[in-house]
Image: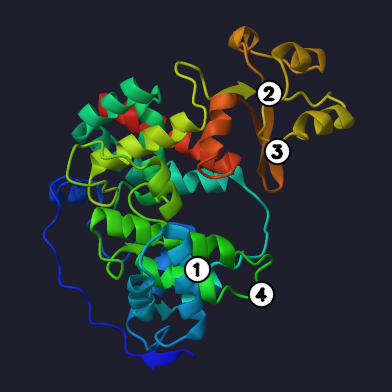
Amino acid sequence: MLRPVMAPPPARPTRPNPTLPSRRVALRTGWGLLGGAWLQGRALAQTVAASASSSSPALSYADSPHAAALAARLAQQTGLDAAWIGTQLDQAQFQPVVARLIIPGRPGQRNWRVYRSRFVEPLRIGAGSDFAQEFDVWLRKAESRFGVPRSVIVGILGVETIYGRNMGGFRVLDALATLALDFPAAAPKDRSPYFASQLGDYFLWCRGSGFDPTQVKGSYAGAIGMPQFMPGNILRYALNFEGGTKVDIIHSAADAIGSVGNYLADHGWTAEQPTHFQLQVPSSIAPDTLARLLAPDIVPSFRAQDLQAAGLPLLPQVLDYPGKLAVVQLPNAGAKPDYILGTDNFYVVTRYNHSAFYALAVIELGNAAMAAAQG
């Protein structure tokens, strides 16, 4: 059974890691502002919730038979010592805030222009410009090795954590244990097996890299570091790009950059190919034709000639593109939607987050930040 424990005292401040953006950069870009004005949407909610939960009593998984059974299963999964895993789980605490945040909110009207304004905005563009200049050598190294443009990597790190500024305030141990052992019944699908597996991967990463499992902070879902990798993805894709003593996507911007490039390359990124093309859909197109073109969603399914035959006006460079394309609709609530043609590389960006809004925000933020860095 769970038993109440008092939350641990706040950790003492640590000296900034030299691989993170400097205090000068933080102040110039507004990262040093108090009040969290730069946080957007759910990121603010989870940060405030994490702060609130850290000062209130929690429930410990120590002596929980369910936690003991999970420790035995994870020992089989990982090959780690069951007693060591059990000792870690004894220190895990149930976090009701995590259980609430994992439940999807009510669906509302999707609005691309509002979504875009949260990410492609002056603060993130300025922060991205400074990041791109400070870590240019690593961005160029990743571009050369993986074929992924610097702008895309800059865009992902900016959307995910504002270049390491907002990496989450929950103990990853608590988040993953809560979702593995007490996944909320109100959620549409029980994902506790997934989070249990991620908890095992988390223990493997901590044991292999020398991190204390009780000290790492991340998102309410257990995502870690500047690129917000889940533990399984850390094991699969994270790189010691900087050449340090371990893989460290929390403190090393170089490792974060290389790891994002590796992730996208492994998911099929094609060098020197575009991500998307602009598209104007004429009002004269038949509704059933448009519905047919939109049906595959973000999956590239049509040749340029197919789209032209369906009545879509295409830019000359679209006709030269050799691959298949997706007709992607970007709703704007009650206003007229925007459209783009997504390429295979656009689809690859959606493997990071399965959303056309997300992918286009990443691309546009990255482009804006690189233009500012070079201007």
Q: Where is residue 19 in the image (x, y as percent from the top left)?
A: 17, 45
Horizontal side of residue 14 vs 348, given as left or right:
left
In this rendering, the answer to whether 142 lies above or below 263 is: above
Q: Is residue 38 visible?
A: no
Front residue (pair 112, 345): 345
Contact? badges 2 and 4 (CB < 8 Å): no
Q: Position of residue 132 (x, y in %)?
A: 27, 33
Q: Which of marks 3 and 1 is nearer the N terminus?
A: 1
CA gap, disc 2 and disc 1: 54 Å
Horizontal side of residue 308 vs 349, given as left or right:
right
Q: Mark 2 points at which residue?
A: 280
Which residue is drawn at the image coordinates 54% and 74% (left, top)?
100
Name the amino acid, label 3.
Answer: Lys
Q: Which of marks 2 and 4 is nearer the N terminus?
A: 4
* Tally of marks: 4
Name the amino acid, label 1.
Answer: Arg
Q: Can residue 93 be seen in this view?
A: yes
Q: Name the residue under label 3.
A: 336
Under circle 1, the secondary element is: helix
CA gap, disc 3 and disc 1: 52 Å
Q: Which of marks 3 and 4 is nearer the N terminus?
A: 4
Q: Name the residue under label 1.
A: 73
CA gap, disc 2 and disc 4: 41 Å
